Amino acid sequence: MADPEPVWTYRGYQLRPGDFATAMVHFFRSEIARANIWRQRLDTTTNWAVVSTGASISFAFSDPSALPFVIVLNTLLVTMFLAIEARRYRYYELWSLRVRLMETDFFAAMLVPPFKPDPDWAESLAESLLQPHFPVSMFEAVGRRLRRNYIWIYLVLGLSFFMKIALQPEPATTWSELISRATLGPIPGELVILMGVMFNLILLMVGLLTMGLHEATGEVLPRFAAQIETGLGDHPLKRWQVWFRPSYQRQQLIALIITDQEKVVSERILGDLKRGVTAMPGTGMYTGKTHGVLMVALTVTEVNKLRSMVAEEDVNAFVVVLPARSVYGKGFSPLDGRAP
């Protein structure tokens, strides 16, 4: 029985289907390990916020003469922890995205017909590896971590502040007395309370405004859209939820090759690069000589191979690589607009 066709070749090395599956398993394990590390870092930041909150509240209430400034200071410290955790959450989502890509389109595809990944799976994974970018924005990351954990910490801090100024050193009997106890140095109590209320309202708005953002792939969220009947006739309110994962494509390019060896160069592109080539006549306006112009649509990962092939066949060739907004046809996005 003949050996199966290699899945991947590079400088004399070849990967057979079994070797490719083994490589993907090791890659999956490495991405799981990275996601777990960043998941632990998220828990660490939350622990910092909880411990500092408990310590500040204990210190504030242990001494009736202690100023409530320590609670305000801890609120700022918790906000810093929230920003750090949101940044770590974005990194966690990057590794989690790759894990989900392999779970949904490599391993899951082995279990159900047609027993092969979706056509855009390799594009999505390759794009994440070649040009990594955060799957979620900082705004969504802050809102999600705020709703999951930090809203309760801020609630405890807010209640503790008002209990401190209302009960110590003795219970306040008038509103003016309560306001005076909120004074922090040269800042009057009215302004301190107003800033505290505005700060918490801003946090509430961030949490509410990011509820509809469901780009996070690491969260366990509903796959399909849900329709909620509002009782307003035939216009139901649609709440769109996230799918498994987003789909990406490698950057698509157009290469123009000006060469006097157009036949040889085009055969190399057709045979080695497996890309279609269109030949056009061209005239160099400086010399007046006729040259062949080859047009090739390709992706960003194929540019270096194209340059090497052209250089091997015609060292005097001229290659121009242009970005393409979209390329439709065989090997790229479907021409009819339907999902591949």
Image (cartoon, grey):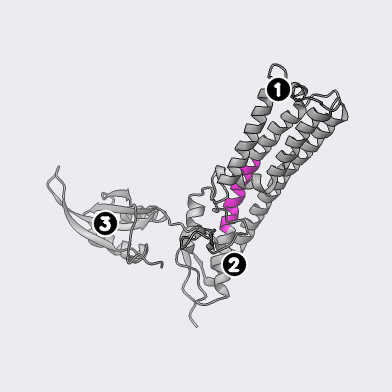
Q: CA distance from mark 1 to mark 3?
A: 72 Å
Look at the picture and state if 68 lies above or below 133: above
**Picture quarter with the C terminus:** bottom left
Q: Give the residue drawn at x 23%, y 53%.
A: 259
Given this view, does label 1 or label 3 mark the residue nearer the observer?
1
Q: 191 or 209, which is in the foreground?
A: 191
Instruction: Answer with left or right where residue 79 lies relative to residue 328.
Output: right
Tag 1 and tag 3, C-beta contact below 8 Å: no
Q: 82 or 165, which is in the foreground?
A: 165
Magenta stretch encompasses residue 89 = yes
The reply to whether residue 42 is in sight is yes
Graded by Cα atoms within 10 Å as few (under 14), some (14 to 19) or many (20 or more), the crowding at tag 2 reads few
Mark found first going from the N terminus, 3 or 2: 2
Magenta stretch encompasses residue 110 = no
Residue type, numbered disc 1? Gly
Q: Can you identify the residue that label 1 sits on?
A: 189
Q: Give the residue drawn at x 68%, y 31%.
A: 76
Look at the picture and state if 193 lies above or below 3: above
Graded by Cα atoms within 10 Å as few (under 14), some (14 to 19) or many (20 or more), the crowding at tag 3 reads many
Instruction: Answer with left or right where residue 165 lies relative to residue 108.
Output: right
Instruction: Answer with left or right where residue 189 lies relative to residue 56.
Output: left
Coordinates of residue 165 in the picture (x, y in percent): 79, 28
Magenta-highlighted residues: 84-98
Q: Secondary structure at mark 1?
A: helix
Q: Secondary structure at mark 3?
A: strand
Q: Can you identify the residue that label 3 sits on?
A: 295
Give me the disc on residue 22. 2
From the image, give the main secondary structure of the stretch colored magenta.
helix
Coordinates of residue 255 in the picture (x, y in percent): 30, 53
Q: CA distance from mark 3 to mark 2?
A: 37 Å
